[in-house]
């Protein structure tokens, strides 16, 4: 799966702000992809002062490389400042007429948090049938192993969309590598511990020695090859 790089002309129209948006000022828009199709997408901005955009690109590519479900279309798009009803405050400091945004196809699926009506920071209703469904989903172990691997501390239930019974989709990798402000030093530091939100949420079943072994086996089986594949892709993109 490739990530497209789209210029200002591809941004066709602003639609509306995202209701569940966090600090990164997401909105819905219409965007023309390289195949000529105009699609409804989510667009999200990160300032150059943090690694959010790089994290989104890397997380999306790595997830796709190991066969985890992510939106079918993803791009970095240069959004004309003039097209936005309100620009993020930092946009004034960006030279030129546009700011880069992370753009993914609108999968028209609700987040699990929305479906569970879970209020942030409140304990999860673990007796809810959808939590039971999640626990029994084959891919759950892959989701958790993936987040361990990429040090994603942000797999809250709003970053897991539910497409249908036992069908989920991963979004929002802005906080991988331990967050927006990682450095080469923090990436190399093997003593740092990162919270695996999904695993904590479904504890204690996900904390048993057997579960840990399953996570380790999952990583061994799938992650190495994907990393090689994606590093080549990322390095090629840096050269262009
Ligand atoms: N590609 C997408 N398809 C469907 N819904 C999405 C998509 N991207 C984002 N959303 C919705 O917008 C919300 C906020 O997007 P997200 O990327 O998680 O940004 P934030 O950094 O604000 O958490 C998500 O919880 C989800 O409900
Ligand atoms: Mg999110």
Image (cartoon, helix red, strand yellow):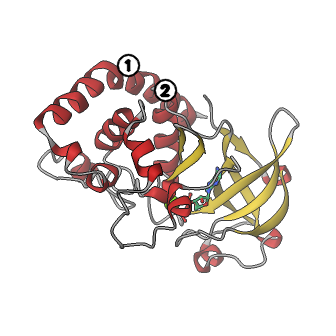
Where residue 2 is drawn, which disc sits there?
none
Q: Quadrant of residue 156?
A: bottom left
Mark 2 or mark 1, which has the lower sequence index? 2
Residue 143, given in percent of the width and then of the height, sits at 39, 38
Residue 150 sits above or below residue 200 on the image: above
Name the residue rendered at 31%, 47% in the picture: 151
Q: Which residue is mark 1?
A: 225
Residue 8 sits above or below residue 134 on the image: below
Question: Contact (CB < 8 A) between labels 2 and 1?
Answer: yes
Viewer-nearest residue: 62 or 119: 119
Q: Please rate how many residues cluster around mark 1, counting C-alpha atoms within 10 Å: few if below 14, some from 14 to 19, many from 20.
A: few
Residue 234, given in percent of the width and then of the height, sits at 50, 33
Viewer-nearest residue: 83 or 70: 70
Q: Is residue 151 left or right of residue 180?
A: left
Quadrant of the rendering where the N terminus is positioned: top right
Quadrant of the rendering where the C terminus is positioned: top right
Viewer-nearest residue: 224 or 231: 224
Name the residue rendered at 35%, 50% in the picture: 152
Kindly report the distance in space between the C-alpha atoms of the residues bearing marks 2 and 1: 9 Å
Where residue 65 is drawn, which disc sits there?
2
Residue 205, given in percent of the width and then of the height, sits at 22, 44
């Amino acid at each position: 799966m490739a990530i497209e790089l789209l210029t200002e002309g591809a941004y066709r129209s602003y639609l509306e702000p995202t209701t569940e948006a966090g600090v990164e000022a997401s909105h819905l828009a219409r965007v023309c992809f390289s195949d000529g199709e105009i699609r409804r997408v989510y667009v999200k901005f990160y300032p150059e002062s943090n690694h959010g955009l790089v994290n989104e690109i890397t997380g999306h590519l790595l997830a796709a490389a190991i066969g985890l479900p992510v939106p079918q279309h993803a791009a970095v798009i240069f959004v004309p400042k003039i097209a936005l009803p309100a620009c993020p405050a930092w946009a004034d400091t960006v030279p030129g007429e546009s700011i880069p945004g992370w753009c993914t196809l609108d999968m028209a699926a609700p987040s699990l948090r929305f479906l569970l009506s879970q209020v942030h920071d409140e304990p999860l209703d673990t007796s809810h049938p959808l939590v039971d469904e999640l626990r029994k989903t084959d891919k759950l172990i892959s989701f958790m192993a993936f987040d361990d691997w990429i040090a994603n501390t942000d797999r809250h239930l709003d970053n897991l969309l539910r497409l249908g019974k036992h069908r989920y989709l991963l979004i929002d990798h802005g906080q991988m590598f331990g967050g927006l402000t990682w450095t080469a030093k923090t990436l190399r530091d093997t003593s740092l511990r990162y919270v695996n939100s999904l695993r904590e949420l479904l504890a204690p079943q996900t904390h048993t020695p057997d579960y840990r072994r399953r996570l380790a086996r999952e990583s061994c089986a799938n992650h190495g090859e994907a990393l090689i594949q994606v590093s080549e892709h990322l390095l090629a993109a840096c050269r262009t």
